[in-house]
Image: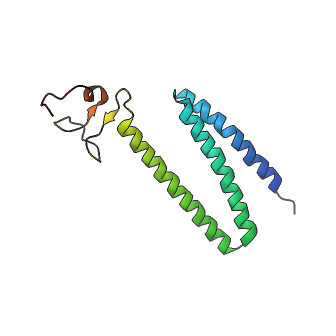
Amino acid sequence: MKELITLNQANLLMLALLVVAPIIGLIAGAAYRKPVPGLAAGVLIGAGNLVLWKVYNLITERLGLDTVKNLLVNLALFAVVGLIAGLAWGWASRTKLRGSGGEGDPVLAGAGGAPPSRGPGESRMTEDAKRPSRDGG
Protein backbone atom coordinates (compact mmCIF):
# COMPACT_ATOMS: atom_id res chain seq x y z
CA MET A 1 0.00 0.00 0.00
CA LYS A 2 1.35 3.41 -0.95
CA GLU A 3 1.61 6.11 1.75
CA LEU A 4 -0.39 9.31 1.32
CA ILE A 5 2.65 11.36 2.31
CA THR A 6 6.20 10.11 2.69
CA LEU A 7 8.54 10.94 5.54
CA ASN A 8 10.68 13.03 3.17
CA GLN A 9 7.64 15.03 2.05
CA ALA A 10 6.63 15.65 5.67
CA ASN A 11 10.19 16.75 6.54
CA LEU A 12 10.15 19.14 3.56
CA LEU A 13 6.82 20.55 4.75
CA MET A 14 8.23 21.15 8.26
CA LEU A 15 11.30 22.89 6.82
CA ALA A 16 9.06 25.06 4.64
CA LEU A 17 7.05 26.00 7.72
CA LEU A 18 10.29 26.94 9.46
CA VAL A 19 10.94 29.45 6.67
CA VAL A 20 7.37 30.67 6.11
CA ALA A 21 6.25 31.09 9.74
CA PRO A 22 8.58 34.03 10.51
CA ILE A 23 7.49 35.77 7.31
CA ILE A 24 3.82 35.34 8.22
CA GLY A 25 4.60 36.50 11.76
CA LEU A 26 6.37 39.59 10.44
CA ILE A 27 3.46 40.45 8.14
CA ALA A 28 0.89 39.88 10.89
CA GLY A 29 2.99 41.89 13.34
CA ALA A 30 3.34 44.72 10.84
CA ALA A 31 -0.45 44.80 10.46
CA TYR A 32 -0.65 45.52 14.21
CA ARG A 33 2.37 47.85 14.03
CA LYS A 34 4.46 45.43 16.12
CA PRO A 35 6.66 43.64 13.58
CA VAL A 36 9.37 42.48 16.01
CA PRO A 37 7.00 40.52 18.30
CA GLY A 38 5.31 39.08 15.21
CA LEU A 39 8.64 37.97 13.80
CA ALA A 40 9.64 36.48 17.17
CA ALA A 41 6.36 34.56 17.37
CA GLY A 42 6.86 33.27 13.84
CA VAL A 43 10.39 32.11 14.62
CA LEU A 44 9.23 30.40 17.82
CA ILE A 45 6.34 28.69 16.05
CA GLY A 46 8.46 27.53 13.11
CA ALA A 47 11.39 26.33 15.20
CA GLY A 48 9.15 24.81 17.88
CA ASN A 49 7.19 22.90 15.26
CA LEU A 50 10.36 21.51 13.69
CA VAL A 51 11.80 20.47 17.07
CA LEU A 52 8.53 18.79 18.08
CA TRP A 53 8.39 17.00 14.73
CA LYS A 54 11.93 15.66 15.15
CA VAL A 55 11.27 14.58 18.76
CA TYR A 56 7.99 12.93 17.72
CA ASN A 57 9.81 10.98 15.00
CA LEU A 58 12.56 9.86 17.39
CA ILE A 59 10.01 8.64 19.94
CA THR A 60 7.94 6.91 17.27
CA GLU A 61 10.97 5.18 15.74
CA ARG A 62 12.11 4.00 19.17
CA LEU A 63 8.73 2.80 20.52
CA GLY A 64 6.96 1.84 17.30
CA LEU A 65 4.14 3.61 15.52
CA ASP A 66 1.28 1.35 16.62
CA THR A 67 2.00 1.00 20.34
CA VAL A 68 0.10 2.31 23.31
CA LYS A 69 3.39 3.32 24.93
CA ASN A 70 4.18 5.56 21.94
CA LEU A 71 0.73 7.14 22.20
CA LEU A 72 1.10 7.84 25.92
CA VAL A 73 4.64 9.21 25.66
CA ASN A 74 3.69 11.56 22.81
CA LEU A 75 0.51 12.58 24.63
CA ALA A 76 2.52 13.47 27.72
CA LEU A 77 5.12 15.35 25.64
CA PHE A 78 2.57 17.48 23.82
CA ALA A 79 0.53 18.08 26.99
CA VAL A 80 3.62 19.38 28.81
CA VAL A 81 4.65 21.55 25.85
CA GLY A 82 1.10 22.93 25.61
CA LEU A 83 1.01 23.65 29.34
CA ILE A 84 4.35 25.48 29.21
CA ALA A 85 3.28 27.47 26.13
CA GLY A 86 -0.03 28.41 27.78
CA LEU A 87 1.66 29.52 31.00
CA ALA A 88 4.21 31.55 29.04
CA TRP A 89 1.45 33.18 26.98
CA GLY A 90 -0.54 34.03 30.10
CA TRP A 91 2.51 35.45 31.87
CA ALA A 92 3.44 37.53 28.82
CA SER A 93 -0.13 38.81 28.53
CA ARG A 94 -0.29 39.84 32.19
CA THR A 95 3.15 41.44 32.06
CA LYS A 96 2.23 43.41 28.94
CA LEU A 97 -1.05 44.55 30.48
CA ARG A 98 0.61 45.82 33.64
CA GLY A 99 3.66 47.48 32.23
CA SER A 100 3.24 48.40 28.59
CA GLY A 101 2.35 52.03 29.25
CA GLY A 102 0.59 52.38 25.91
CA GLU A 103 -2.15 54.92 25.31
CA GLY A 104 -5.28 53.90 27.20
CA ASP A 105 -3.79 50.78 28.78
CA PRO A 106 -5.07 50.12 32.28
CA VAL A 107 -2.66 50.30 35.18
CA LEU A 108 -3.80 47.61 37.56
CA ALA A 109 -4.01 48.32 41.26
CA GLY A 110 -4.30 44.71 42.45
CA ALA A 111 -3.67 41.22 41.19
CA GLY A 112 -7.16 40.81 39.77
CA GLY A 113 -7.46 44.30 38.39
CA ALA A 114 -10.00 46.83 39.47
CA PRO A 115 -13.72 47.13 38.84
CA PRO A 116 -14.91 49.57 36.18
CA SER A 117 -15.61 52.29 38.76
CA ARG A 118 -12.60 54.45 39.58
CA GLY A 119 -12.49 55.06 43.29
CA PRO A 120 -9.35 55.77 45.34
CA GLY A 121 -6.65 53.15 44.81
CA GLU A 122 -8.39 51.51 41.87
CA SER A 123 -7.08 51.24 38.33
CA ARG A 124 -6.55 54.36 36.32
CA MET A 125 -5.76 54.85 32.69
CA THR A 126 -2.10 55.32 31.81
CA GLU A 127 -2.46 59.01 31.06
CA ASP A 128 -4.12 59.50 34.48
CA ALA A 129 -1.41 57.50 36.22
CA LYS A 130 1.24 59.97 35.07
CA ARG A 131 -0.46 62.75 37.01
CA PRO A 132 -0.39 62.82 40.82
CA SER A 133 -3.63 61.82 42.48
CA ARG A 134 -5.89 64.46 44.02
CA ASP A 135 -5.93 62.82 47.43
CA GLY A 136 -2.14 63.06 47.82
CA GLY A 137 -1.56 59.26 47.61
Residue at position x 44%, y 48% from top? 90
Report the side of 130 relative to 53 (left or right): left
The image position of residue 86, as x and y in percent, is 49, 52
Q: Quadrant of residue 62?
A: bottom right
Count of numbered badges drawn on the protein: 0
Residue at the limit of the structure toward the right, as seen here: 1
The image position of residue 17, as x and y in percent, is 70, 43
Residue 87 sits above or below residue 23 on the image: below
* The C terminus: image quadrant: top left
The image position of residue 89, as x and y in percent, is 48, 47
Residue 66 sits above or below residue 114 on the image: below
> Residue 31 or 136: which is nearer the viewer?
136
Residue at the limit of the structure toward the left, as seen here: 135
Residue at position x 67%, y 70% from top? 70
Residue 105 sits above or below residue 66 on the image: above
Report the side of 133 relative to 105 (left or right): left
The image position of residue 39, as x and y in percent, is 60, 35
Q: Quadrant of residue 24?
A: top right
Residue at position x 36%, y 31% from top? 101
Residue at position x 69%, y 55% from top? 53
* The N terminus: image quadrant: bottom right
